[in-house]
Protein backbone atom coordinates (compact mmCIF):
# COMPACT_ATOMS: atom_id res chain seq x y z
CA UNK A 1 0.00 0.00 0.00
CA UNK A 2 2.79 2.37 1.03
CA UNK A 3 4.66 1.62 -2.21
CA UNK A 4 1.65 2.61 -4.29
CA UNK A 5 1.68 5.99 -2.58
CA UNK A 6 5.32 6.65 -3.29
CA UNK A 7 5.73 9.96 -5.06
CA UNK A 8 9.36 9.86 -6.05
CA UNK A 9 10.54 6.29 -5.45
CA UNK A 10 13.57 7.41 -3.40
CA UNK A 11 15.23 4.11 -2.50
CA UNK A 12 18.14 5.08 -0.23
CA UNK A 13 17.19 7.09 2.84
CA UNK A 14 18.02 10.78 2.74
CA UNK A 15 18.85 12.07 6.21
CA UNK A 16 18.79 15.64 7.47
CA UNK A 17 22.55 15.64 7.20
CA UNK A 18 25.47 13.47 6.24
CA UNK A 19 29.02 14.14 7.39
CA UNK A 20 31.54 15.47 4.89
CA UNK A 21 34.54 13.16 4.65
CA UNK A 22 37.79 13.86 2.81
CA UNK A 23 39.33 11.19 0.55
CA UNK A 24 40.41 8.36 2.86
CA UNK A 25 43.88 8.04 1.30
CA UNK A 26 44.64 11.63 2.30
CA UNK A 27 44.17 10.73 5.95
CA UNK A 28 46.71 7.88 5.91
CA UNK A 29 49.85 10.13 6.08
CA UNK A 30 48.41 11.80 9.20
CA UNK A 31 47.91 8.39 10.79
CA UNK A 32 51.45 7.36 9.87
CA UNK A 33 52.79 10.41 11.70
CA UNK A 34 50.79 9.53 14.80
CA UNK A 35 52.04 5.93 14.63
CA UNK A 36 55.63 7.18 14.28
CA UNK A 37 55.55 9.61 17.18
CA UNK A 38 53.22 7.64 19.44
CA UNK A 39 51.78 10.85 20.86
CA UNK A 40 48.07 10.15 20.97
CA UNK A 41 46.70 12.95 23.13
CA UNK A 42 47.46 15.57 25.84
CA UNK A 43 48.17 18.51 23.55
CA UNK A 44 50.23 16.73 20.87
CA UNK A 45 51.54 18.28 17.64
CA UNK A 46 48.31 17.96 15.62
CA UNK A 47 46.35 19.48 18.50
CA UNK A 48 48.70 22.48 18.54
CA UNK A 49 48.58 22.80 14.74
CA UNK A 50 44.78 22.63 14.58
CA UNK A 51 44.36 25.32 17.24
CA UNK A 52 46.61 27.65 15.22
CA UNK A 53 44.98 26.75 11.88
CA UNK A 54 41.49 27.36 13.27
CA UNK A 55 42.47 30.75 14.74
CA UNK A 56 43.69 31.66 11.29
CA UNK A 57 40.71 30.33 9.38
CA UNK A 58 38.07 31.71 11.72
CA UNK A 59 39.78 35.04 12.39
CA UNK A 60 39.85 34.68 16.18
CA UNK A 61 42.57 35.18 18.79
CA UNK A 62 42.60 31.98 20.85
CA UNK A 63 41.01 28.56 20.64
CA UNK A 64 41.03 25.65 23.01
CA UNK A 65 40.02 22.32 21.47
CA UNK A 66 37.70 19.89 23.23
CA UNK A 67 36.42 16.33 22.92
CA UNK A 68 32.95 17.70 22.15
CA UNK A 69 30.86 20.86 22.28
CA UNK A 70 29.01 19.87 25.45
CA UNK A 71 32.16 19.52 27.56
CA UNK A 72 33.33 22.79 26.06
CA UNK A 73 30.11 24.48 27.25
CA UNK A 74 30.43 22.95 30.72
CA UNK A 75 34.06 24.12 30.95
CA UNK A 76 33.34 27.58 29.55
CA UNK A 77 30.93 28.17 32.44
CA UNK A 78 33.53 26.85 34.93
CA UNK A 79 36.24 29.04 33.49
CA UNK A 80 34.24 32.23 34.11
CA UNK A 81 33.08 30.93 37.52
CA UNK A 82 29.43 31.32 36.56
CA UNK A 83 26.98 30.48 39.35
CA UNK A 84 23.34 31.08 40.31
CA UNK A 85 21.10 31.73 37.30
CA UNK A 86 21.83 32.06 33.59
CA UNK A 87 19.37 33.50 31.10
CA UNK A 88 19.07 31.31 28.02
CA UNK A 89 16.84 30.12 25.19
CA UNK A 90 14.53 27.11 25.24
CA UNK A 91 14.85 26.86 21.44
CA UNK A 92 18.08 24.88 21.08
CA UNK A 93 19.61 21.44 21.36
CA UNK A 94 19.28 20.15 24.88
CA UNK A 95 23.05 20.37 25.54
CA UNK A 96 22.75 24.16 25.93
CA UNK A 97 20.73 23.94 29.15
CA UNK A 98 22.27 20.64 30.29
CA UNK A 99 25.65 22.38 30.49
CA UNK A 100 24.11 24.72 33.07
CA UNK A 101 22.62 21.91 35.16
CA UNK A 102 25.97 20.09 35.14
CA UNK A 103 27.40 23.19 36.84
CA UNK A 104 24.57 23.44 39.35
CA UNK A 105 23.31 26.58 37.58
CA UNK A 106 19.62 27.31 37.11
CA UNK A 107 18.60 28.04 33.52
CA UNK A 108 16.09 30.87 33.18
CA UNK A 109 14.32 30.57 29.85
CA UNK A 110 13.18 33.63 27.93
CA UNK A 111 11.28 33.79 24.67
CA UNK A 112 12.79 33.98 21.21
CA UNK A 113 12.45 36.63 18.54
CA UNK A 114 9.64 35.69 16.16
CA UNK A 115 11.73 36.47 13.07
CA UNK A 116 15.17 35.06 13.89
CA UNK A 117 14.29 32.37 16.46
CA UNK A 118 17.23 33.61 18.54
CA UNK A 119 16.89 34.89 22.10
CA UNK A 120 14.79 38.10 22.23
CA UNK A 121 16.96 40.76 23.93
CA UNK A 122 13.89 42.76 24.94
CA UNK A 123 12.96 39.90 27.29
CA UNK A 124 16.31 39.75 29.10
CA UNK A 125 15.99 42.58 31.62
CA UNK A 126 12.76 41.32 33.13
CA UNK A 127 14.42 37.95 33.76
CA UNK A 128 17.42 39.36 35.64
CA UNK A 129 17.47 38.70 39.41
CA UNK A 130 20.19 39.21 42.05
CA UNK A 131 21.29 35.61 41.24
CA UNK A 132 21.82 36.17 37.52
CA UNK A 133 25.47 35.93 36.51
CA UNK A 134 25.40 35.39 32.76
CA UNK A 135 23.47 35.15 29.50
CA UNK A 136 23.85 32.11 27.27
CA UNK A 137 22.37 32.85 23.84
CA UNK A 138 22.57 30.45 20.88
CA UNK A 139 23.29 31.51 17.29
CA UNK A 140 20.53 29.18 16.16
CA UNK A 141 21.11 27.63 12.69
CA UNK A 142 24.25 29.80 12.53
CA UNK A 143 22.17 33.00 12.30
CA UNK A 144 23.81 35.63 14.52
CA UNK A 145 21.96 36.79 17.63
CA UNK A 146 21.24 40.46 18.23
CA UNK A 147 24.78 40.81 19.55
CA UNK A 148 24.73 44.57 20.16
CA UNK A 149 21.58 44.58 22.28
CA UNK A 150 22.69 41.55 24.29
CA UNK A 151 26.09 43.12 25.02
CA UNK A 152 24.53 46.41 26.05
CA UNK A 153 22.36 44.70 28.66
CA UNK A 154 25.25 42.52 29.84
CA UNK A 155 27.41 45.62 30.32
CA UNK A 156 24.66 47.47 32.19
CA UNK A 157 24.09 44.61 34.62
CA UNK A 158 27.68 43.32 34.76
CA UNK A 159 26.78 39.94 33.30
CA UNK A 160 29.00 37.58 31.30
CA UNK A 161 27.92 36.42 27.84
CA UNK A 162 28.74 32.90 26.70
CA UNK A 163 27.55 32.18 23.18
CA UNK A 164 26.59 28.65 22.31
CA UNK A 165 27.98 28.92 18.79
CA UNK A 166 27.71 25.21 18.01
CA UNK A 167 26.05 26.06 14.66
CA UNK A 168 28.15 29.12 13.83
CA UNK A 169 31.44 27.78 12.46
CA UNK A 170 32.81 30.29 9.94
CA UNK A 171 29.88 32.71 10.26
CA UNK A 172 30.74 36.37 9.74
CA UNK A 173 28.80 39.31 11.09
CA UNK A 174 29.65 42.80 9.81
CA UNK A 175 32.75 41.34 8.10
CA UNK A 176 34.09 39.83 11.31
CA UNK A 177 33.83 36.43 12.92
CA UNK A 178 30.66 36.17 14.98
CA UNK A 179 32.80 34.20 17.44
CA UNK A 180 34.60 37.36 18.55
CA UNK A 181 31.56 38.56 20.46
CA UNK A 182 30.68 37.95 24.07
CA UNK A 183 33.13 36.68 26.70
CA UNK A 184 33.39 33.21 25.19
CA UNK A 185 31.97 31.31 22.21
CA UNK A 186 31.62 27.56 22.08
CA UNK A 187 31.77 25.48 18.89
CA UNK A 188 30.78 21.90 18.14
CA UNK A 189 32.68 19.75 15.65
CA UNK A 190 30.21 16.86 15.89
CA UNK A 191 29.71 14.59 12.87
CA UNK A 192 26.53 16.51 12.00
CA UNK A 193 28.24 19.91 11.87
CA UNK A 194 29.67 21.98 9.00
CA UNK A 195 33.21 21.22 10.14
CA UNK A 196 33.52 17.88 11.90
CA UNK A 197 36.29 16.03 13.69
CA UNK A 198 33.98 13.01 14.21
CA UNK A 199 33.36 14.30 17.76
CA UNK A 200 34.89 17.58 18.87
CA UNK A 201 34.38 21.10 20.03
CA UNK A 202 36.21 24.26 21.04
CA UNK A 203 36.08 27.39 23.14
CA UNK A 204 36.97 30.66 21.44
CA UNK A 205 38.37 33.21 23.86
CA UNK A 206 39.74 36.73 23.52
CA UNK A 207 42.84 36.58 25.77
CA UNK A 208 45.69 34.22 26.52
CA UNK A 209 45.07 34.17 30.28
CA UNK A 210 41.54 32.83 29.77
CA UNK A 211 42.79 30.25 27.27
CA UNK A 212 45.39 29.06 29.75
CA UNK A 213 42.74 28.67 32.45
CA UNK A 214 40.53 26.73 30.02
CA UNK A 215 43.49 24.55 28.97
CA UNK A 216 44.11 23.67 32.61
CA UNK A 217 40.43 22.98 33.26
CA UNK A 218 40.18 20.56 30.32
CA UNK A 219 43.21 18.67 31.65
CA UNK A 220 42.05 17.90 35.22
CA UNK A 221 43.24 21.33 36.40
CA UNK A 222 46.86 20.19 35.99
CA UNK A 223 49.47 22.92 35.50
CA UNK A 224 52.56 20.77 35.92
CA UNK A 225 53.60 17.46 37.50
CA UNK A 226 53.07 18.73 41.01
CA UNK A 227 50.45 21.47 40.57
CA UNK A 228 46.67 21.10 40.23
CA UNK A 229 44.85 24.44 40.35
CA UNK A 230 41.21 23.45 39.93
CA UNK A 231 38.91 20.43 39.94
CA UNK A 232 39.16 20.15 36.15
CA UNK A 233 37.80 17.53 33.82
CA UNK A 234 39.18 15.49 30.95
CA UNK A 235 37.96 17.37 27.87
CA UNK A 236 41.02 17.08 25.62
CA UNK A 237 40.76 16.42 21.91
CA UNK A 238 42.84 13.42 20.80
CA UNK A 239 45.52 13.57 18.10
CA UNK A 240 43.43 11.49 15.71
CA UNK A 241 40.54 13.96 15.87
CA UNK A 242 42.89 16.94 15.59
CA UNK A 243 44.65 15.43 12.57
CA UNK A 244 41.30 14.79 10.93
CA UNK A 245 40.34 18.41 11.62
CA UNK A 246 43.45 19.67 9.85
CA UNK A 247 42.52 17.65 6.78
CA UNK A 248 38.87 18.71 6.97
CA UNK A 249 39.89 22.36 7.03
CA UNK A 250 41.21 21.97 3.46
CA UNK A 251 37.70 21.13 2.27
CA UNK A 252 35.50 23.32 4.44
CA UNK A 253 35.17 26.24 1.98
CA UNK A 254 34.13 23.80 -0.74
CA UNK A 255 31.55 22.29 1.63
CA UNK A 256 30.08 25.67 2.57
CA UNK A 257 29.91 26.76 -1.04
CA UNK A 258 27.93 23.61 -2.04
CA UNK A 259 25.65 24.21 0.95
CA UNK A 260 25.04 27.76 -0.32
CA UNK A 261 23.98 26.34 -3.71
CA UNK A 262 21.60 23.89 -2.04
CA UNK A 263 20.10 26.68 0.07
CA UNK A 264 19.53 28.77 -3.08
CA UNK A 265 18.00 25.87 -4.98
CA UNK A 266 15.55 25.05 -2.18
CA UNK A 267 14.54 28.72 -1.97
CA UNK A 268 14.04 28.93 -5.71
CA UNK A 269 11.97 25.75 -5.91
CA UNK A 270 9.93 26.30 -2.76
CA UNK A 271 9.19 30.00 -3.05
CA UNK A 272 5.92 29.39 -4.88
CA UNK A 273 4.61 26.81 -2.43
CA UNK A 274 1.88 28.45 -0.38
CA UNK A 275 2.30 28.05 3.35
CA UNK A 276 6.06 27.40 3.30
CA UNK A 277 8.15 30.19 4.83
CA UNK A 278 11.91 30.61 5.07
CA UNK A 279 13.92 31.88 7.98
CA UNK A 280 16.27 34.74 7.13
CA UNK A 281 19.25 36.03 9.07
CA UNK A 282 19.36 39.69 10.10
CA UNK A 283 22.13 42.22 9.39
CA UNK A 284 25.17 41.94 7.20
CA UNK A 285 26.12 38.28 7.44
CA UNK A 286 28.08 35.55 5.70
CA UNK A 287 26.33 32.34 6.71
CA UNK A 288 27.52 28.73 6.71
CA UNK A 289 24.20 27.14 5.63
CA UNK A 290 24.40 24.59 8.41
CA UNK A 291 20.64 23.94 8.36
CA UNK A 292 17.73 24.58 6.04
CA UNK A 293 14.75 25.29 8.32
CA UNK A 294 11.34 25.93 6.79
CA UNK A 295 8.18 26.98 8.58
CA UNK A 296 4.90 25.24 7.83
CA UNK A 297 2.21 27.90 8.07
CA UNK A 298 -1.56 27.42 8.25
CA UNK A 299 -2.05 28.00 4.48
CA UNK A 300 -0.15 24.76 3.82
CA UNK A 301 -2.60 21.85 3.43
CA UNK A 302 -0.79 19.55 5.90
CA UNK A 303 0.30 20.12 9.46
CA UNK A 304 4.03 20.21 10.10
CA UNK A 305 3.89 16.71 11.62
CA UNK A 306 1.87 15.34 8.69
CA UNK A 307 4.47 16.69 6.28
CA UNK A 308 7.25 15.20 8.43
CA UNK A 309 5.49 11.79 8.26
CA UNK A 310 4.78 12.11 4.53
CA UNK A 311 8.47 12.77 3.88
CA UNK A 312 9.46 9.82 6.11
CA UNK A 313 7.17 7.54 4.14
CA UNK A 314 9.13 8.67 1.08
CA UNK A 315 12.48 7.88 2.74
CA UNK A 316 13.29 11.51 3.53
CA UNK A 317 14.21 11.94 7.19
CA UNK A 318 13.85 15.61 8.05
CA UNK A 319 14.18 16.79 11.66
CA UNK A 320 12.08 19.09 13.81
CA UNK A 321 14.99 21.07 15.26
CA UNK A 322 14.01 22.28 17.88
CA UNK A 323 10.93 20.39 18.97
CA UNK A 324 10.23 19.70 21.78
CA UNK A 325 11.60 22.83 23.41
CA UNK A 326 14.32 22.21 26.01
CA UNK A 327 11.96 23.67 28.61
CA UNK A 328 9.50 20.81 27.91
CA UNK A 329 11.88 18.06 29.06
CA UNK A 330 11.22 16.62 32.55
CA UNK A 331 14.27 18.17 34.25
CA UNK A 332 13.17 21.69 33.19
CA UNK A 333 9.37 21.50 32.86
CA UNK A 334 8.54 22.54 36.42
CA UNK A 335 10.73 25.66 36.36
CA UNK A 336 8.61 28.85 36.39
CA UNK A 337 10.38 30.19 33.27
CA UNK A 338 9.41 27.01 31.36
CA UNK A 339 5.77 28.04 31.49
CA UNK A 340 4.12 28.14 28.07
CA UNK A 341 2.80 31.65 28.68
CA UNK A 342 6.38 32.87 29.12
CA UNK A 343 7.50 31.41 25.78
CA UNK A 344 4.76 31.95 23.17
CA UNK A 345 7.03 32.43 20.14
CA UNK A 346 9.29 29.53 21.10
CA UNK A 347 6.28 27.21 21.33
CA UNK A 348 4.95 28.50 18.03
CA UNK A 349 8.34 28.06 16.30
CA UNK A 350 8.77 24.53 17.66
CA UNK A 351 5.37 23.54 16.28
CA UNK A 352 6.02 24.91 12.78
CA UNK A 353 9.68 24.20 11.98
CA UNK A 354 11.08 21.47 9.78
CA UNK A 355 14.76 21.19 8.86
CA UNK A 356 15.21 19.82 5.35
CA UNK A 357 18.25 17.75 4.33
CA UNK A 358 21.32 19.84 3.54
CA UNK A 359 24.85 18.52 3.09
CA UNK A 360 27.47 18.78 0.35
CA UNK A 361 26.79 15.37 -1.22
CA UNK A 362 23.04 16.03 -1.61
CA UNK A 363 22.40 16.15 -5.36
CA UNK A 364 20.18 18.59 -7.25
CA UNK A 365 18.07 15.61 -8.28
CA UNK A 366 17.49 14.65 -4.65
CA UNK A 367 16.55 18.26 -3.82
CA UNK A 368 14.03 18.25 -6.66
CA UNK A 369 12.57 14.99 -5.36
CA UNK A 370 12.24 16.41 -1.83
CA UNK A 371 10.53 19.53 -3.18
CA UNK A 372 8.20 17.37 -5.30
CA UNK A 373 7.02 15.61 -2.11
CA UNK A 374 6.45 18.96 -0.38
CA UNK A 375 4.56 20.34 -3.39
CA UNK A 376 2.33 17.31 -3.86
CA UNK A 377 -0.19 17.99 -1.08
CA UNK A 378 -0.65 21.53 -2.42
CA UNK A 379 -1.35 20.17 -5.89
CA UNK A 380 -3.70 17.51 -4.52
CA UNK A 381 -5.40 20.21 -2.48
CA UNK A 382 -5.99 22.51 -5.42
CA UNK A 383 -7.28 19.53 -7.51
CA UNK A 384 -9.63 18.20 -4.87
CA UNK A 385 -11.46 21.46 -4.36
CA UNK A 386 -12.58 22.03 -8.00
CA UNK A 387 -13.54 18.39 -8.46
CA UNK A 388 -15.66 18.49 -5.28
CA UNK A 389 -17.26 21.68 -6.52
CA UNK A 390 -17.97 20.07 -9.90
CA UNK A 391 -19.68 17.14 -8.18
CA UNK A 392 -21.93 19.56 -6.34
CA UNK A 393 -23.11 20.97 -9.64
CA UNK A 394 -23.77 17.59 -11.27
N1 LIG B 1 24.67 23.32 21.39
C1 LIG B 1 23.94 23.23 20.26
C2 LIG B 1 23.13 24.41 19.84
C3 LIG B 1 23.96 22.05 19.51
O1 LIG B 1 23.22 21.96 18.37
C4 LIG B 1 24.76 20.97 19.93
C5 LIG B 1 24.76 19.74 19.18
C6 LIG B 1 25.52 21.12 21.09
C7 LIG B 1 25.44 22.32 21.80
C8 LIG B 1 26.39 20.05 21.63
O2 LIG B 1 27.52 19.81 20.80
P1 LIG B 1 28.20 18.30 20.82
O3 LIG B 1 28.42 17.93 22.24
O4 LIG B 1 27.24 17.37 20.12
O5 LIG B 1 29.49 18.51 20.07
C9 LIG B 1 22.50 15.98 16.62
C10 LIG B 1 23.91 15.97 17.14
O6 LIG B 1 24.22 14.77 17.85
C11 LIG B 1 24.25 17.14 18.00
O7 LIG B 1 25.66 17.25 17.99
C12 LIG B 1 23.67 18.43 17.45
N2 LIG B 1 23.88 19.55 18.31
C13 LIG B 1 22.18 18.26 17.23
C14 LIG B 1 21.53 19.49 16.67
O8 LIG B 1 22.00 17.22 16.29
P2 LIG B 1 20.66 14.22 16.91
O9 LIG B 1 20.19 13.44 18.09
O10 LIG B 1 19.63 14.86 16.06
O11 LIG B 1 21.65 13.35 16.01
P3 LIG B 1 21.39 12.08 15.11
O12 LIG B 1 22.32 11.00 15.56
O13 LIG B 1 19.95 11.76 15.07
O14 LIG B 1 21.90 12.58 13.69
C15 LIG B 1 21.10 13.30 12.78
C16 LIG B 1 21.26 12.68 11.40
O15 LIG B 1 22.59 12.84 10.96
C17 LIG B 1 20.99 11.19 11.35
O16 LIG B 1 19.65 10.99 11.02
C18 LIG B 1 21.91 10.68 10.27
C19 LIG B 1 23.02 11.70 10.21
N3 LIG B 1 24.27 11.19 10.79
C20 LIG B 1 24.50 11.32 12.13
C21 LIG B 1 25.66 10.87 12.68
C22 LIG B 1 25.93 10.98 14.15
C23 LIG B 1 25.20 10.61 9.96
O17 LIG B 1 24.97 10.48 8.74
N4 LIG B 1 26.38 10.18 10.49
C24 LIG B 1 26.66 10.27 11.82
O18 LIG B 1 27.76 9.87 12.26
O19 LIG B 1 21.65 15.30 17.48
Image (spheres, grey):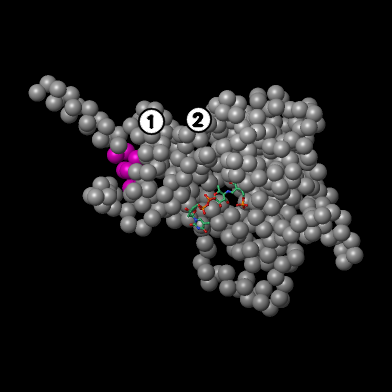
The residue that appears at 68% across and 41% down in the rendered structure is 163
Residue 205 appears left or right of 350: right
Q: Residue at x 55, y 31 (%)?
A: 346
Q: How many marks?
A: 2
Most prominent secondary structure in the magenta stretch?
A: helix
Instruction: Assess whether residue 329 is covered by the magenta stretch.
Output: no
In terms of depth relative to the viewer, which is nearer, 263 or 90? Answer: 90
Residue that appears at 51% across and 67% down: 23
Residue assigned mark 1: 275
Q: Residue at x 59, y 55 (%)?
A: 190
Residue 129 image position (x, y, % from top left): 76, 28
The answer for how far apart the CA atoms under marks 2 and 1 are is: 15 Å
Chain-order first, disc 2 or disc 1:
1
Depth check, mark 2 against mark 1: the one in front is 2
Q: Which mark is residue 348?
A: 2
Label 1 within 8 A of ligand 1 by Cβ? no
The answer to which image quadrant residue 184 occupies is top right
Determine which quarter of the picture holds residue 165.
top right
Residue closest to the eye, 342 or 336:
336
x and y percent of residue 63 in the render?
72, 52
Residue furthest toward the right?
Answer: 226
Give the residues in magenta. 368-376
Image location of residue 156, percent across then percent down: 78, 27
In the rendered image, the residue lying farthest to the left is 394
- Indicate yes or no whether the magenta region holds residue 369: yes
The quadrant of the image that shows the C terminus is top left
Instruction: Identify the residue at the far bottom of this view.
Output: 36
Q: Tag 1, which secondary structure?
A: loop
Amino acid sequence: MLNQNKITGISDPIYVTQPSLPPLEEFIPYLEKIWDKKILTNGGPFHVQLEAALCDYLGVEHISLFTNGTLALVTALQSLRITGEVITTPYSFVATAHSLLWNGIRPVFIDIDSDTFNIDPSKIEAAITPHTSAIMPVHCYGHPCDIESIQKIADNYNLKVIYDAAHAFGVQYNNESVLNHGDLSVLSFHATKIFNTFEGGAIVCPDLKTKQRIDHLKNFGIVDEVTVVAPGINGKMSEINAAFGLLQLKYVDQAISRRREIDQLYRELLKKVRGIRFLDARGQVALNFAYFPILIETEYPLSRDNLYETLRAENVFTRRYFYPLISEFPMYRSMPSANRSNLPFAFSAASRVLCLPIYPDLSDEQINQIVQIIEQPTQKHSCVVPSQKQQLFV
